[in-house]
Amino acid sequence: MMKYLKILHISLTERLAYRADFFLTTFFRFLPLVTTFLLWEAIYAGAPKADDGAETTIVGFTRDKMIAYLLLVQISRMFSSMPGLATGIAHDIRDGNLKKYLLQPIDMLWYLLSYRGAHKIAYIATTALPYGILFFLFRDVFDLPGPWTWLAYFLSLILAFLIGFFFEACIGIAGFWLLEVTSFMYIVNIFTFFVSGQLFPLELLGEYPYLTAALEVLPFQYLAYFPAMVFLEKRQGTELIVGLLIEFAWAIGLLVFCRWLYHVGLRHYSAYGG
Amino acid sequence: MLLRYVNLWFSLAKFSLLGELAFRGNFLIKIFVELLWLGILLLFNYTIFQQTTSIADWNAQQYFFFIGCYFAMGGLIEMLFLDNCNQFADLVRSGDLDFFLLRPIDEQFLVSCKHVDWSCAPNIILGAVIMSLALWQIGWTFDTIQVGIFLVLFASGTALAYGFLLILMSASVWLMRNQSLFEMWWLFTTLMRYPSEIFKGPWAQPTGWFFFFVIPIMLVTNVPARVMVRPLLEPWLACYAIAAAIVVVAASRYIFRAALQHYRSASS
């Protein structure tokens, strides 16, 4: 356990070594958020008004709830996105660098999990201020939930992190059999961006019942949509507990599958390079 | 002189195409990725227009023309420059930039134009198809002058985007870890993805003005799209877009050369 904590500490130091690059990228990451808010403002402004003068809603979301949702999916993705993980694993397999894990008393998956944990802590710590300001500016769009919802939300985020990690690790491990996974990752990233609910609430796809039914059983909604819906208290009672249990089952299922895939892959592996 | 560079570019483009065709599977996957992205973009906007009648006074057909214009422009920039600029940070870090500086041709041309990413070429065609469909739905009648102005503004928009890309790329020399240029560029171009009219409100309007007049990235798609589908285009706006493109391209060249002055070879 101690060695993985050491890895976490070293990775954190490394991550903060290039501060200018880190802060510049962080600043740029706010641009899509700003334009998305403005786009939704324009969408609500153009939407037909209710006859009784009630506030305009789109698939059950008022303008405030939509802004809150879009902010919350950013937090979800902060936990669940794993840039470079799959391609990193695949490159290590292809270039023969994987042997560094095999020659040392260290497990690749736990090592990478610690490394990603550090990455997430560094990212959350350094973006806490700008995100804090952003959430403060939009504080009126939120109704703060009760302590049980907070707990459920936190749990859903941790599970989102695990699902995101093991899902991408599985794709990376596919590098034992595929020469190149980069192109495949592009497809997965674009697909995930859409089906995880990062672009808009999945209720908007209501007119495609087969698509929504498929998304219900797949793990992607837990990467962004589900945690946001938990915080907004649109998942409560039994629905919330069942949702969390399914999310937990996906995290465990992907962990087991990932470990099995890695085990099988190692039997298939031949190291190259000096 | 110019002819020499044109011939050189065609040779490089041909060489790039041969390289792409050597890995046909990868080439087809890249095209599929672009198609998927376009499909999602269209589905998203179609879904949105099921809920609203207009976005910032752009109706569905006008908005889809804007998307087509953005997609074609983005495809052109990705095809010609993005991959080259993305590799610049690695050239600086590894010292391989030396080999570019030793050649008897302009460094900026070689660094930013040596590889043509043919997998993005279909984006230009698809963008043009979306624009054509939108114009057909509007009931547009062919106007040579209007198309001519559009093409000039489209070219100036491309030049403007190239200038900004070159400035971001040049920052690698100082930052030394500009590994995420592709991501940064994608984030930055968010500002050319939507009509400028969405920037409404006490803080959004000044922000919109800032990115329209100070760092004029919003001109890239907004001005050419407007000339075709919006009822009125102020002549000053067209002139301003062209002037901005000239200034930004000149500034980007100056910054690129300043970056080269700061470059210290890393090779042995």
Image (spheres, coloured by chain):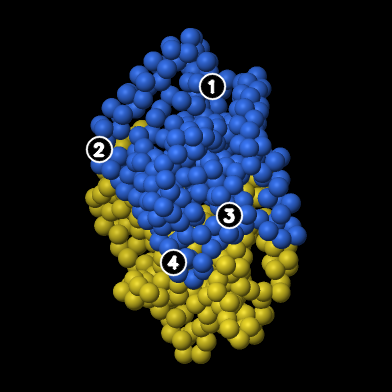
The residue positioned 37% from the left and 67% from the top of the image is A254
Which disc is residue B47 wearing? Answer: 4
Q: Which residue is mark 3?
A: A32
Q: Which residue is mark 2?
A: B24
Colour of chain A in the image: yellow
Tell me, for residue B108, which label it has, or none: 1
Q: Is residue A66 above or below residue B129?
A: below
Q: Is residue A76 visible?
A: no
Work out whether disc 2 and disc 4 sit on a shared chain.
Answer: yes
Same chain for the residues under marks 3 and 2 in the image: no
Label 4 secondary element: helix
**Residue A49: percent from the left, percent from the top?**
58, 77
In this picture, residue A35 sits left or right of residue B64: right
* Labels 1, 4: front one: 4
Give the CA separation, mark 3 to mark 2. 33 Å
**Residues at marks 4 and 3, CA–CA distance in whole angstroms:** 19 Å
In space, the residues marked 2 and 4 are separated at their CA atoms by: 34 Å
Look at chain B in the picture and name its colour.
blue
* Host chain of mark 3: A
Q: Secondary structure beneath disc 2?
A: helix
Q: Residue at x 54, y 43 (%)?
A: B227
Marks 2 and 1 close (CB-CB < 8 Å) = no
Marks 1 and 4, Cα distance to the nearest angstrom? 43 Å
Does the CB distance between marks 3 and 2 fall below 8 Å?
A: no
Give the letter of the chain under mark 2: B
Figure label count: 4
> How far across and how far down the image is residue B116, in percent?
39, 30
